[in-house]
Image: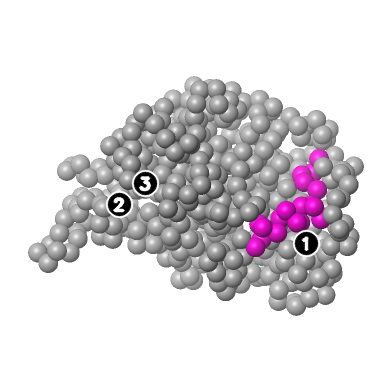
Amino acid sequence: MSSNQHFIGKALLELCFLFSLIFTGCQKSLDKPLLGQYSNTTFYQTQLQAVQAVNAAYQPLSFTSATSNPIWVFGDVASDDAVAGGNPGDENDITLIDKFNITPSNGNLGNEWNTLYEGITRCNMVLAKVPAISMEDTLKTRILGEARFLRAWYYFNLVIVFGDVPVILQPMNADQLQITQSPVKVIYESVIENDLKLATGMLPEFYSSGDVGRATQGAAISLLAKAYLFQQKWDSSTIYSSAVISGNHYAMTKNYSQNFSPSYKNNSESVFEVQMISGQTPQIGNALNQWFAPAVYAGYYFDAPTQSFVDEFEKTPAGVYDPRLDYSIGRDSMNWFNNLVFSASWSPTGYLSRKNQESFTQAPIIGDGNCDYTAIRYADLLLWNAESLNEQGKTAEALIPLNLVRKRARESCLNDTTLPALKDTSGNRLVPPNLLPDITAIDQATVRAAIQHERRVELGMEFHRYFDVIRWGQAYATMVMANSPGFNYDNDKSFPIPQTERDTNKALQ
């Protein structure tokens, strides 16, 4: 295990121990007896235990099981970018979401709800118990900042998936959990924004190699910019995204594909990255490398990209595609992994996602991948900045971050010898003519459409698309979701609260 993976490896390997000591699962199971040596009143006594507790609060972010954190189902499969895929009849609940035949009993709803509230429960325990521990003050502050960032992250995802949800900000017993929903606006302002503003003053800018992967100040500021963006608080979003940009702590990688390679984990573009490591016991590798892989790899070929998504990528008059296309998907007759050529027969749409995939030399065991999931990339933040500037009428300024993203995409041709390129008389690689030229439009509507396009191709198959579609409003959503006949904006802008939760919490409306 490399040094920059030390924290997350140690954190997740400790979980089996911690589960048996203090954590009792999601809200519904808080009344279960504790099984280990410690109760939650005796565990939080030492500095080491404080670190272990916050380590455990990161675990619900992971994809060690594709069903325990099915955010990809909501972000990709529900959108116009992908269909359920998979063998007919397999994981039927995913297909039902794809077709917008969604009832509260759909298992993906319960899995995502439980995952997010499990994370919140762990953060609440840290915030309640760690302040009383006698320990080094700087470390204590950092741990509490991490817990606030993570709690904001979990609530943000609850809001964009489910809308109004119950707010729980302290440890509670089962008999205290009859709590109705709070409005989205209240959750943003009183929980998410508040936690992130506090976290920005508590978290470091960087970590030493043994702690890479923890939440940083930049991650907290970035998530705050995203929270404001989703609320259409354009000025505030601009302030915080600009603060990250001007801090010069992050930069896009030279080659777009480096963001999805195990060889470039925690690179300069990574603002917040979910750490996954193959070959560990218990497993802390990425299970998505099996869920998204073709059957020839013993994969399940879910989350299959659509023709609509493929058609979104630009192509020059000479037929050269945006390099991000073949970095993002497998398509017929193109190179795949392990020296195989992709076959359209491997997928019901003719395409599969390349992201979260890797060669057998990088991850010998299918279902135990070594790819991280970068939850916030610097390119994503640049596009938030462009969008918030444009929506304030600062369109000329918005072109700067927008075109930086396009520049990196086209200049991948200079850095990856597998991509088509011209060469000058000295043999230096050149960008093919007319490939992803800068956007020069100056009217707001045209630039808005350009930003929406750029987000789709830059961030495709990274579980963001459906949430963008919904926040861009009914007219946009109705247009792009036209091939999803079951979709209704008013009904489907949020997903139903799971029936299992309604059966437990009778205060839900």
Q: Left of 341 or right of it: where is 189? A: right
Label 2: few (<14), some (14–19) or many (≥20) C-alpha neighbours in 10 Å:
some
As drawn, the label of residue 127 is: 1
Q: Nearer the viewer, residue 368 or 398?
A: 368
3 and 1 marks in contact (CB < 8 Å): no
Q: Which of 161 and 257 is in front in this view?
A: 257
Q: Quadrant of the N terminus?
A: bottom right
Q: Which residue lies furthest to the left in this view?
A: 425
Q: Give the vertical position of 376 relative to 207 (above or below).
A: above
Q: Which residue is drawn at 75% across and 61% down?
A: 53
Residue 439 in view in this figure: yes
Q: Left of 96 or right of it: where is 310? A: left
Q: Which of marks 1 and 2 is nearer the N terminus?
A: 1
Q: Which percent across, then down, holds residue 407?
A: 31, 57
Instruction: Name the amino acid type tagged 3.
Output: Asn
Foreground disc of the pair 2, 3:
3
Kindly state the secondary structure of the residue where label 1 is placed.
helix
Q: Total marks drawn?
A: 3
Instruction: Name the amino acid type tagged 2.
Output: Ile
Instruction: Name the amino acid type tagged 1.
Output: Leu
Q: What stretch is highlighted in magenta?
A: 10-28
Q: Name the residue under label 2.
A: 439
As drawn, the label of residue 338 is: 3
Q: Which of 505 and 12 is in front in this view?
A: 12
Q: Which residue is drawn at 33% across and 54% down?
A: 409
Q: Quadrant of the C terminus?
A: top right
Identify the colour scheme used: one colour
Q: Residue at x 35, y 62 (%)?
A: 254
Q: Left of 110 or right of it: where is 361? A: left
